Image (tube, grey):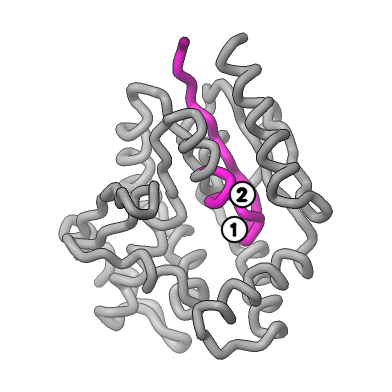
Amino acid sequence: MRKIIIAIDGFSSTGKSTIAKELAKSLEYIYVDTGAMYRAVALFALRNEFISSKSFEREKLLAQLENIKLEFVYNKNLGFAEMYLNGENVEKEIRGMEVSQYVSRIAEIPQVRKKLVEQQQQMGKEKGVVMDGRDIGTVVFPEAELKLFMTASAEIRAQRRFEELQTKGEKVSFEEVLENVQKRDELDSNRKDSPLRKASDAIEIDNSNLNRKAQFEKILKLAQDSISA
């Protein structure tokens, strides 16, 4: 059976990572969460005080790019790979609201995107990969055999994210989360370098009213059809 590349793009908090993990596990493919890579760089910038609500010292971050080592390490207990930044497991830390506030600003920097896109393309060289992000089907793998574009209303996405953060013990309001979702949408869609957009040959999945099981079954069927095509 041939192996393909499955590119999953879309807005924040549409469940891209969740569906990509499930799909990769079912197909026995490698899963790559490109958003985690940008989040890890954002965490690096925060830790080194290169970015804050008041300032962003881009040149200092760019000077340190070569010292940022990113890798995915498979966790047998979880069934998927976790993000490591310079040898440290940062999977939990990169998912918080603080990192979420700055990740879009990090992702719009051309030099950062160039570095990470090169790594992502290398990861998918042998195919058999499910990769999710913002520009996988348009920039990273424009020739991917299956492209999906995930969307849902901002309010529904914010509610999902709010509930997720609450279960992790973060003290945030729904209004704060909604504002963050809307701001990220604007930044991702309007950045000059590789803006978020649906590839012309991508299949749109609006999961505003789809439960997780129905969505997975629909996408798995699309993947199986593409593999056997």
Q: Residue at x 56, y 16 (%)?
A: 227
Instruction: Tell whether label 2 touches label 1 (CB within 8 Å).
Output: yes
Q: Which mark is residue 99?
A: none
Q: Amino acid at mark 1?
A: Asp
Q: Which label's residue is closer to the chain start, 1 or 2?
A: 1
User: Where does the C terminus fall, quadrant-wise?
Assistant: top right
Label 1: few (<14), some (14–19) or many (≥20) C-alpha neighbours in 10 Å: many
Q: Amino acid at mark 2?
A: Leu
The residue at which mark 2 appears reads as 196
Q: Position of residue 76 (x, y in %)?
A: 31, 48
Residue 28 part of the magenta segment: no
Range of the magenta residues?
1-20
In the rendered image, which quarter is residue 87 located in?
bottom left
Q: Is residue 172 left or right of residue 120?
A: right
Work out which residue is located at the far front of the displayed protein and give it: 77
In the rendered image, which quarter is residue 208 located in?
bottom right
Q: In the rendered image of this protein, does residue 192 appear above or below residue 124?
A: below
Q: In the rendered image of this protein, does residue 221 appear above or below residue 93?
A: above
Q: Is residue 13 left or right of residue 71?
A: right
Q: Is residue 22 left or right of residue 42?
A: right
Q: Which mark is residue 188?
A: 1
For the question of whether residue 190 can be seen, the reply is: no
